[in-house]
Amino acid sequence: MPVIVFDFDKTLTQKDTVLGFLSATSDKGFMPVRRLVFLFFSVLHKFRFISNDRLKEAGIRLFLKNMEESMVKKSAAVYSKGIPLSNIYTTEFVAKYPRAIIATASYEDYVRPLFKDNLVLAAKLGFKDGKVSGLKQNAFGPQKVKLLNEQGINTVDILYTDSFSDRALMNISTIVYLVKNDNIKKIKG
């Protein structure tokens, strides 16, 4: 059976979902200010001043820190139902590879409800005493390869992604499709 892997944000979705999840889930005040601070951290990440792990930690501190685990899980399930999926979701994932692996830096809490029958390798929130404590696991760039390796998967037959941040994953893939605005371009294989 071939190993098919899809990235999630901007590959199977129409837009990035992380800030939407953080905003929709948070019970903290001053939301416009929190979003602005998070966008500042996002710019720092874009220009490689901070790592994706640090960006995720900042988001957790700003929006979710000390929230009840049950509240986060409930909000994540509701949020997942409203995520606008891309045409690639329908034409490639559903029509061709519905058993594919989802490897994403998005949070498992809202990705898992969309892909109940699939292997989902995603970022995970850490919880202590039933409350959000930080980032337990990230799945960004080379971390995706590590998570696949932990599942006994060392090569990928087909990869769909929107970003060269998945270069490590591209390196172990035979065929790579780059997805941009519901357009697919074969860049390897």
Image (tube, helix red, strand yellow):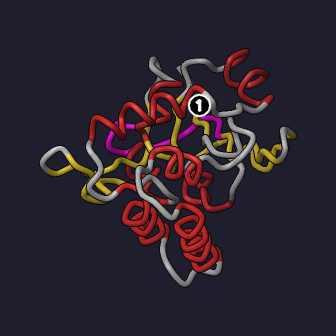
Q: Closest to the observer: 149 or 163?
A: 163
Q: Is residue 122 left or right of residue 184?
A: left
Compared with 100, 69 (above or below) is below
Other residues around mark 1 within 10 Å, as few (<14) / some (14–19) / many (≥20)? many
Tell me what residue is drawn at x 68 percent, y 24 percent.
93
Compared with 104, 58 (above or below) is below
Q: Is residue 91 left or right of residue 156?
A: right
- The spot of residue 39 in percent (x, y) is 61, 70
- The spot of residue 1 in percent (x, y) is 52, 19
Query: Which residue does the numbered mark 1 point to in the structure image?
Result: 4
Q: Residue furthest left?
A: 129
The local secondary structure at tag 1 comes to strand
Asked whether 155 falls inside the magenta stretch, the response is yes
- The spot of residue 117 in percent (x, y) is 45, 17
Tell me what residue is drawn at x 45 percent, y 35 percent.
76
Q: Please identify the quarter of the rendering in which residue 36 is found.
A: bottom right
Q: Residue furthest front?
A: 29
Q: Is residue 165 left or right of residue 25?
A: right
Name which residue type carries label 1: Ile
Compared with 95, 86 (above or below) is below
Tell me what residue is drawn at x 61 percent, y 35 percent.
157
Q: Which residues are magenta?
A: 149-159
Asked whether 35 falls inside the magenta stretch, the response is no
- The spot of residue 148 in percent (x, y) is 41, 43
